[in-house]
Image (cartoon, rainbow, N blue to C red):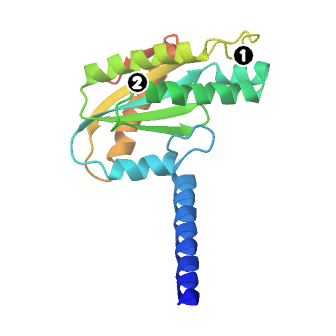
């Protein structure tokens, strides 16, 4: 009986370790290691699971990020990326999706929100980011800000996310052409 109980105990411990490893692998596959937000694969997967509903997509670029990295070092750049992730999580709602799109670009998907509400949230995010980066790399002359493109659409079928993201990208680059550090909406 003791051997049987010992064997069962070992099997339970091994199953728990296996499950923990699977969770860690899943996390690594769908989350950005530096910031903890979703990565592209995680965003695509999470977007596909959304029900059909109106939504807003923010495409966010950290202004002057390359200059910050070049003049203040990559550690300062990493701190700015982490500060953005923290600021984004403080202003987004529980069902919103935040992902690192690549480099210094991030995507936020907000189900069930109007375009006007999305713009207000984007402005709030800019302010939260400014607060979060105050004091980071204080000796650095480069101050990061956010340029944000906003687009609305509906979670629906394959290709929808890319189409809405393309619209948000157009709004983002209009913002960058017109001076950065602000929010533009796709018309």
Q: Residue placed at 36% from the left, 20% from the top? A: 121
Q: Which residue is mark 1?
A: 137
Q: Which residue is mark 2?
A: 91
Q: Where in the figure is residue 31, as x and y percent of width and height?
A: 53, 47
Residue, x 52% and y 90% (percent of image)? 1
The residue sitting at 52% across, 39% down in the picture is: 101
Where does the image place residue 112, in percent across and percent down from the top left? 24, 34
x, y (%) of residue 56?
A: 31, 32
Query: Is residue 89 left or right of 144 when viewed as pictured?
Result: left
Give the side of residue 110 with respect to residue 146, left or right: left
Q: Residue furthest left?
A: 53
| Along the line of sight, the residue nearer the viewer: 21 or 102 | 21
Is tag 2's residue or tag 1's residue first in the polypeptide sequence? 2
Is residue 91 visible to us here? Answer: yes
User: Mark 2 and 1 residues: CB-CB less than 8 Å, in contact?
Assistant: no
Marks 2 and 1 sit apart, C-alpha to C-alpha, by: 23 Å
Badge 1 local density, few (<14 within 10 Å), some, or many (20+)?
some
The secondary structure type at the circle numbered 1 is loop
Which structural element holds mark 2?
helix
**Tag 2: Cα neighbours inside 10 Å, few (<14), some, or many (≥20)?**
some
- Residue 187 appears in the figure: no
Residue that extends furthest to the front in the rendered view of this protein = 2
Between 117 and 148, the residue placed more toward the observer is 117
The residue nearer to you, when weighing 126 against 158, is: 126
Q: Give coordinates of residue 48: x percent, y percent.
A: 34, 52
Q: Residue at x 52, y 28 (%)?
A: 86
Query: Does 20 appear above or below 14?
Result: above
Q: Is residue 54 above or below residue 13?
A: above
Quadrant (top left/top right/bottom left/bottom right) for the C terminus: top left
């Amino acid at each position: 009986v003791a051997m049987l109980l010992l064997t069962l105990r070992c099997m339970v411990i091994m199953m728990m370790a296996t499950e923990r490893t699977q969770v860690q692998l899943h996390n690594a596959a769908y989350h950005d290691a530096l910031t903890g937000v979703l990565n592209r694969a995680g965003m695509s997967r999470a977007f596909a699971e959304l029900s059909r509903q109106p939504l807003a997509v923010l495409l966010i670029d950290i202004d002057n990020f390359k200059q910050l990295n070049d003049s203040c070092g990559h550690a300062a750049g990493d701190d700015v990326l982490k500060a953005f992730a923290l600021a984004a999580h403080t202003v987004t709602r529980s069902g919103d999706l935040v992902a690192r799109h690549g480099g210094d670009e991030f995507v936020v998907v907000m189900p069930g929100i109007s375009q006007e509400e999305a713009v207000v949230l984007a402005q709030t995010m800019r302010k939260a980011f400014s607060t979060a980066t105050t004091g980071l790399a204080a000796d650095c002359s480069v101050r990061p800000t956010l340029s944000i493109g906003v687009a609305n659409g509906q979670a629906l079928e394959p290709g929808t996310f890319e189409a809405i993201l393309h619209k948000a990208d157009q709004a983002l680059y209009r913002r960058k052409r017109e001076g950065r550090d602000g929010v533009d909406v796709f018309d």
